[in-house]
Image (spheres, coloured by chain):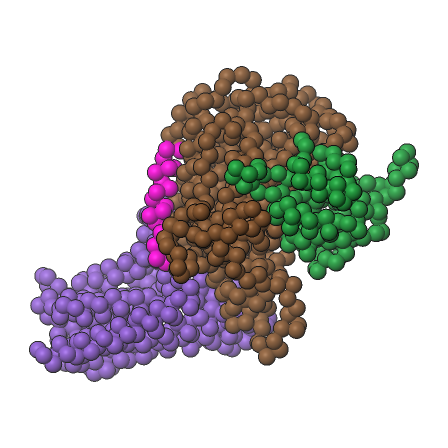
Amino acid sequence: MAFSEDIVRLCERFGLTELPDEGPVVERKDVVAFAHALKDELGFFFFVYCVATHYPADEKTEQPDRTLVTYRVRRLPIPGVRPTETFPFRLWVPTGDTTPSLTSVWAGADWQEREQFDLVGTVFEGHPDLRRLMMPEDWPGHPLRREYAIETQHFPWR
Amino acid sequence: MTVGTTYETPRAGERKGEVRTVNVGGMRVPYHLTLLERPDPYLDIDSYDPEADLMALNMGPQHPSTHGVLRVKLYLDGETCIKAVPYLGYLHRGVEKLCEKLTYVQITPIVDKNDYVSPMMNELAINMAFEALLKVEVPPRALFIRTVCAEIQRVASHLLWLGTFGLDVGGGIGGGATLFMHTFREREMCLDLFENLTGCRFHYNTHQVGGNRHDIPEGWDQKVKRALGHIASRVDEYEAFVENPIFKARTIGVGVIDPILAMELGVCGPILRASGIDFDLRRDAPYAAYDKVEINVPVETAGDAYARYLVRVREMRESIRIALTLLDGVPEGPISALKPVKGPTNVKPKPGEAYVSIESPRGELGTYVISDGSPNPYRCKLRPPSLHAAALLPYLAPGSMVSDIVATLGSLDFILGEVDR
Amino acid sequence: MMEGGLLFGNPWLHGLIMGVIVLSGAMGVAAYAVWFERKFAARMQNRPGPTEVGYGGLLQPIADLLKLLQKEHLIPRSADRPLFNLAPVLVVIAPLATLAVIPFGPGLVGTDPSIGLLFALAISSLMVIPVWMAGWASNNKYALLGAMRAAAQAISYEIPLLLAAMVPIVLTGSFRVGDIVAAQEGGRWFAFWPPGPGFFAFLLFFFASLAESNRIPFDIPEAESELVAGVTTEYSGMIFGLIYLAEYLHTFIASALAALLFLGGWQGPGPDGIHWMLLKSLLVFAVIFWIRWSWLRYRSDQLMAMCWKIFLPLGLVLVMASAIWVQLR
């Protein structure tokens, strides 16, 4: 699956030459401008999802403890002009660091980022209302982190 | 350019049947919907007019019309809402964590319970993602069965929506209950069809990685034709029952949705189509056997609850037509590409990731899977359309009365099992 | 009618005996109205309805009553106890007091004063005060909203109701219910004679009393999909049963009044008597249920707009029209 030409051109403008199917890895400082360009110039109005995936520190590859945040946006078809197309882009966020929130670009990022903050613990900077979405407010830990094991941790509902 | 039809002159100066559209990023968007004000969902209630005597009303989690266990905190000025804050998570079951724990084979019955109104769709979405990860070709017979099942499920889901929407605007002790009982009678027919096919009435577990588990039994196609023909005639009756001045007074102009906002929030499906955006994944990004059949997408331009009702009713008819068309062309052949799985850890995709989305009755139901080569997914994100539809609430509630909020809630048709997962 | 309208010579004795008969009769009718409505609704919805208790579920109202009596009467800690307990009792008193002046047959009436109709409408509209008490004393926001809506609705719809009732009063020239019925002798029911104002007044009276007794499409005060149960949210057990009973009594009284004022009361083809009165009022009653189980609900502001913009002007026009008809006759 290759991306359309205009997407490739936009990515080049942001210095993204590698475009795997999983989407380019965007620098955290660029991401808001990149998102604005996607929405305003290319018509990616439709927000599909925001997913954070926790990768614990790996001794073999010497990678630190970090989180992969994936956004996916879609543009809707225009009859006779273009088909519908989704475009993912990713960010690496070291644990303890923050990533800019895209709520100002797509309103739908609001709850999705809250959910990822709740379940994975990624902090989105500039989010207007960063509270837990699913779990109770006083819940310890973030369930979708790899160190959060189902067997060992069990908190009765209070 | 005209998009769909309209039932009443939405704004002065426009004739019936014709809606002015404007160009937004290449798309044609109904002009009158772009004029809507977008309320501030982060309104600071403390700095709101101190003279106003506000009342905070907790609607839910045990409230008859929050469709399960949604809790919405409403700040009311009289009966007019100033701000609405939804609180989710009362039905959170940690499905995504469970998906990381279970193997690819074991996940299907778990996700069945997400959107408990259309389980067929959940299975389809997640298994299509696993198949994309494994790069398996599904045999055409399985594809056809899947598509027919999906369409029957869509009919069942919309029937349930129509009934519960009647409860919302008409009350459980009144005309709404009558509508509810009748739509449930027809929904039972759909469930009977599934029982005949899979042995289960509801949580089927009939899709598996690489194909289907159950082949079409003897005489099933005749039963489907009879049942769907019956339902098609009943849909006309519902229309006659529902379309009275009271229903129109309660739904026209209620919960009008700006399509641009809806897209930014990720809302799609009937809600987006009722706001004048002609987008349907079945037609625009065909999956399963949808490329074998012509699909007419119903579009309305008013963007209110009544438009959503119209879109869903037309979709029911369209789904019946699609299911009947496809049923005639089910090819012979195997129903699964993979051999029957002996152990739960037999399915092991290579490291990689996949995102697959289908058009569920509520919109784009997607599954994003990351595999690390082990028998269970590394990360499995379910993209529920209901969560995005529920996110519309803080934008729709301000400025409307409690009765309208209930009607809007009902017309958005979100399923809390899917919202909270 | 009997001499002086009294079946038993002494007015006190008459009042006592008739009171017992009418009240117990009305209670029975209200109880069996519940059974009837449940069967009726069930038939509309492809269900059998109550079948288990007695033949065709005929003992269901008694079983329900026993169940309600056995239930615990919960009072929320934050509720205003005396008001909370007093309100349901007062809610029942209003329709029961109205029954005193409603004749069910020639002479079958507690008392038939010269201002009977005025008394009936005045007392039945008093119900808004205990309903508001119940809503306030529950200390529950849904109950408060429901009571607010109930008060607004009852006060607004009182006016078209009175205006509709004015039409037979103007045509008869008397407030006495017995006189109004007598004026419709010979099949000249006010709903059809004089042609025009009477029929519209009947419709107006019917819809206004639907709103008065909080029935769909005007059941906004208890709108269970919005306000959970309105004023009855916090009530349980028999004290809830009292409010429930009052609602049914209110509906029954509204249909009885409609039968008396517009459908000729106990008169009919063949022998006059209570059977015609019961038949007509139960017919109106059934139409109310029919509407209830097939229509949806209006929003409160639409309801108010309908009252002030349609019903009130219509009522004024009808009163004027009937006055002109009386003058020209």
Q: Main secondary structure of the magenta part?
A: helix
Q: Colour of chain B?
A: brown
From the viewer's side, name the closer residue of B40 and B100.
Answer: B40
Asked whether the viewer can see residue B218, the reply is yes
C181 falls in the magenta region: no
Q: Residue furthest top?
A: B333
Magenta stretch: give its range.
B228-246
Residue visible at 77% across and 37% down in the picture: A17
Q: Considering only vertical position in the picture, is B111 above or below B12?
A: above
Q: Is residue C117 left or right of residue C236?
A: left
From the viewer's side, name the closer residue of B233 and B57.
Answer: B233
Residue visible at 73% across and 52% down in the picture: A32
Residue visible at 78% across and 42% down in the picture: A15
Residue visible at 66% across and 22% down in the picture: B341
Asked whether the viewer can see residue B130, the reply is no
Q: Give the image location of residue B231, x and y in percent.
A: 38, 37
Q: Give the image location of residue B31, x and y in percent.
A: 49, 55
Which quadrant would the N terminus of chain C be assigned to in this image? Answer: bottom left
Q: Is residue B357 left or right of residue C309?
A: right
Q: Colour of chain C?
A: purple
Q: Give the image location of residue C93, x and y in percent.
A: 37, 75
Spot the green chain and give its letter: A
